[in-house]
Amino acid sequence: MILWLLAISPVFSQTGTVIFEVDGIDLKRGGDLSSGVFLEPGFPKVGKQFRGQATAITSSTMKVEFKDLPAGVYAAAIYQDIDKNSDLKTNWIGLPQEPIGFSNNVRIKMGPPSFADAQFQVQPNKTVTLKITLR
């Protein structure tokens, strides 16, 4: 039993932490801060995140933490879910109608940013802190 635990212990230590420092939150409009960490396939579609969480908005700047992420390359999308329906509200051509931001503060141009533009690295036993501004 002890040998088995020693054999698998490196697997558990191959994780890191990401902290997003989010600003641009419209406190008056309220809602939840919906955060997602994505692998390349599925970025940045709501519901396709590798890990996600919703946090009640309490301030115009907030920190969102994802612990125990396996080491690797990710991208993040965070939006202010004003109507708390767990879905990003868009207009008829697909542009977001709720404040949204991406890792590396990549802006929306003619569509969502690419995974390559928004990517960041999670390393074992390290913490990465990224600033994201909602627009």
Image (tube, rainbow, N blue to C red):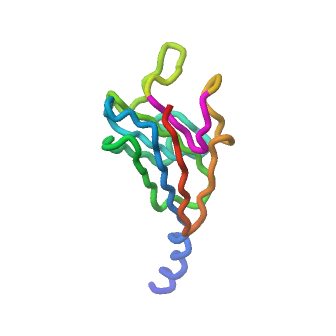
Up/down of 125 relative to 56, above or below:
below
Left or right: residue 89 compared with residue 115: left
Q: Position of residue 32 (x, y in %)?
A: 34, 38
Q: Position of residue 55 (x, y in %)?
A: 34, 44
Residue pictured at 46% horizontal, 86% vertical: 2
Toward the viewer: 61 or 106?
A: 61
Toward the viewer: 9 or 102?
A: 102
Up/down of 81 relative to 96, above or below:
below
Q: Is residue 105 magenta?
A: yes
Residue pictured at 64% horizontal, 26% vertical: 109
Toward the viewer: 12 or 56?
A: 56
Residue pictured at 39% horizontal, 46% vertical: 53
Toward the viewer: 93 or 10?
A: 93
Place residue 85 in its image quadrant: top left
Q: Position of residue 31 (x, y in %)?
A: 32, 34
Q: Which residues are magenta?
A: 99-108
Residue pictured at 50% horizontal, 31% vertical: 135
Instruction: State the count of labels.
Output: 0
Q: Looking at this rendering, what residue extends furthest in the top direction? A: 92
Left or right: residue 30 compared with residue 22: left
Place residue 111 in its image quadrant: top right
Up/down of 94 relative to 77, above or below:
above
Q: Is residue 133 magenta?
A: no
* Quarter containing the N terminus: bottom left
Q: Position of residue 93 (x, y in %)?
A: 54, 15
Up/down of 47 relative to 120, above or below:
above
